[in-house]
Amino acid sequence: MFKRILALFVVLSLAVTLAGCGQKSVPEKPAQEEQLSGTVIVDGSGTVYPLMAHIAEEYMTNEQPKVSVQVGRAGSSAGFKKFIPGETDFSDASRAIKDKEKAALEEKGLKFGTDILEFKMALDGLTMVINKDNTWAKEMTKDEIVNMYLAGKYKADDKVLWSDIRSDWPKEEIKFYGPNENHGTYEFFFETILEKQEMVKTANLQQEYSTLVDLVSKDKNAIAFFGFGYYVNNQDKLQAVAVDFGNGPVEPTLETIGEDLPYAGFTRPVFTYLNLVHAKGKPEILDFAKYVVSDQGAERLAGENGFAPFPSSVYEGYLKQLEAI
């Protein structure tokens, strides 16, 4: 009887031990990630706005629904005026930050490259757009575009006719349009394309790109310049000018826009700038910054918004930089 009781005790003990081991082998479910909350403020370039707004929408929908990402479009220069005193967390720009803006940041105790980080978002192609009924200026050389926008090049009063550009074109006055001085696109056109030469006095410069689209769509003699993305979203109202940079006319497309591609003459990078001091103090800002440069952010959404993405390695480098913080 004693041996039977002892054997039963051993069996029961072994069963309990095995049961305990079995319970320990079941993996525990990982704890759900904590949801972030708060507000991220972005302002700046109207050109970059559609891309950044799309990224923000995807982030709030799929990643952090309790975080509010507010994206404005005051213009590159106007955006920096808000960014420098710390009113915004990100500043979008369709041109690189200027030395005087870096100096203004340093006066606020913010060192560029340490407290302020620069991220290239994508590549944009400056696009010349004309009215749908314009049948003569579908192709132009770069020199023709530059010269027509130069003050005093053809007429002292800058009332330039299409026939001044090519003699067989209509003897109708060209109506020049473009974004105003708040925008990096204006600065790129003035500083890089026109090489800082004075623009025609008759140019009608606007704050809103939607206004430019409307003006050109209603005027057969109009021509304007802005980012490729705005043209893509308004192809039903406008047509793009194919530009001859010396090897034949090239239409701006995602396949031709690039620093080493046929539309390189009018290609430029667009940027966003991050206040890292803000990001270190508020996890929602840092988290959104990581999303912007992740494979779900600018790289994935650039093409949908009329931009050519950089190689994956560019975004991966930015992400490693942020993950090290």
Image (cartoon, rainbow, N blue to C red):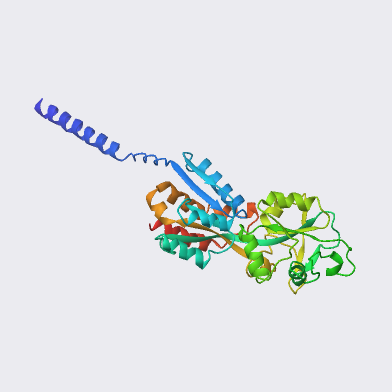
Rendered residue at 67%/54% (across/down): 229
Q: Residue lying farthest front?
A: 157
Q: In the rendered view, tell whether residue 97 sits above or below residue 29.
A: below
Along the horizontal axis of the image, is 275 left or right of 138?
Answer: left
Seen as rendered, the residue at the extreme left is 2
**Nearer to me, 55 or 25:** 55
Residue 59 is situated, as x and y percent measured from the top left of the image, at 51, 45
Q: Is residue 119 left or right of residue 126?
A: left
Q: Quadrant of residue 26?
A: top left
Q: Position of residue 63 (x, y in %)?
A: 48, 43
Indicate whether 9 appears above or below 148: above
Observer able to see residue 179: yes
Name the residue rendered at 77%, 53% in the picture: 216
Specify the farthest residue to the bottom. 246
Q: Quadrant of residue 106?
A: bottom left
The residue nearer to you, when weighing 172 against 253, is: 172
Name the residue: 40% across, 55% down: 277
- For the N terminus, the image quarter is top left
Residue 174's x, y, as percent? 81, 61
Name the quadrant of the C terminus: bottom left
Q: Nearer the viewer, residue 278 or 231?
A: 278
Write down the quadrant of residue 17 in the picture: top left
Residue 294 visible in the displayed image: no
Above-or-below relation of 82 to 4? below
Residue 34 lies, in percent from the top left, at: 39, 41
Q: How many marks?
A: 0
